Image (cartoon, grey):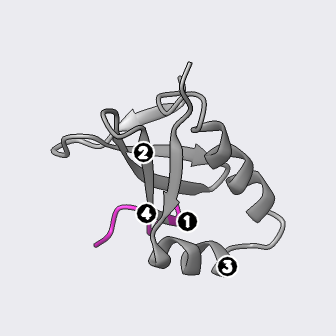
Amino acid sequence: MEFFKIQWKSSAEKELRRIDRKQIPRVVEKVEMLRKNPFPSDCYKIEGAKSVYRLRVGDYRVVYEVRVKEHLVIIYRVRHRKDAYRK
């Protein structure tokens, strides 16, 4: 079984630093789990997007893209659920 590489966009890293400090380890742990399985049972595909998914971590959402051929997971956003889907 091959593992996926995790790539954080700089904007996602900034957003991660801005969230509640107690939640940061939980978010990072969930993202690291995507290395083994980028399609866990609690992820949902975002409508209208080809390979973009969201992952729930408490009140926060991680929005990411999976590139299966490249074995790559790109983290785009880490936001509170009320702001997660705004552009």
Q: Callout 1: 10 Å neighbours few (<14), some, many (20+)? A: some
The Cα–Cα distance between marks 4 and 3, rounded to whole angstroms, is 15 Å
Q: Callout 4: 10 Å neighbours few (<14), some, many (20+)? A: some
Could you tell me which secondary element the residue under label 2 belongs to? strand
Task: State the image coordinates of residue 60 (x, y, percent, origin top left).
Answer: 59, 58
Majority secondary structure of magenta residues = loop
The image quadrant of residue 33 is: top right
- Number of the front mark, 1 or 2: 2
Q: Callout 3: 10 Å neighbours few (<14), some, many (20+)? A: few
**Residue 84 on the magenta segment:** yes
Specify the segment rendered in magenta: 78-87
The disc, 3 or 1, on the residue closer to the chain's N-terminal end is 3
Task: State the image coordinates of residue 74 (x, y, percent, origin top left).
Answer: 42, 54
The Cα–Cα distance between marks 3 and 2, rounded to whole angstroms, is 23 Å
- Residue where numbered disc 3 is placed: 17
Could you tell me which secondary element the residue under label 3 belongs to? helix
- Residue where numbered disc 1 is placed: 80
Task: State the image coordinates of residue 80 (x, y, percent, origin top left).
Answer: 55, 65
The Cα–Cα distance between marks 1 and 2, rounded to whole angstroms, is 24 Å
- Residue where numbered disc 4 is placed: 84
Q: Give the residue at x 19% y 41%.
A: 50
Could you tell me which secondary element the residue under label 4 belongs to? loop
Q: Are marks 1 and 4 in contact (CB under 8 Å)?
A: yes
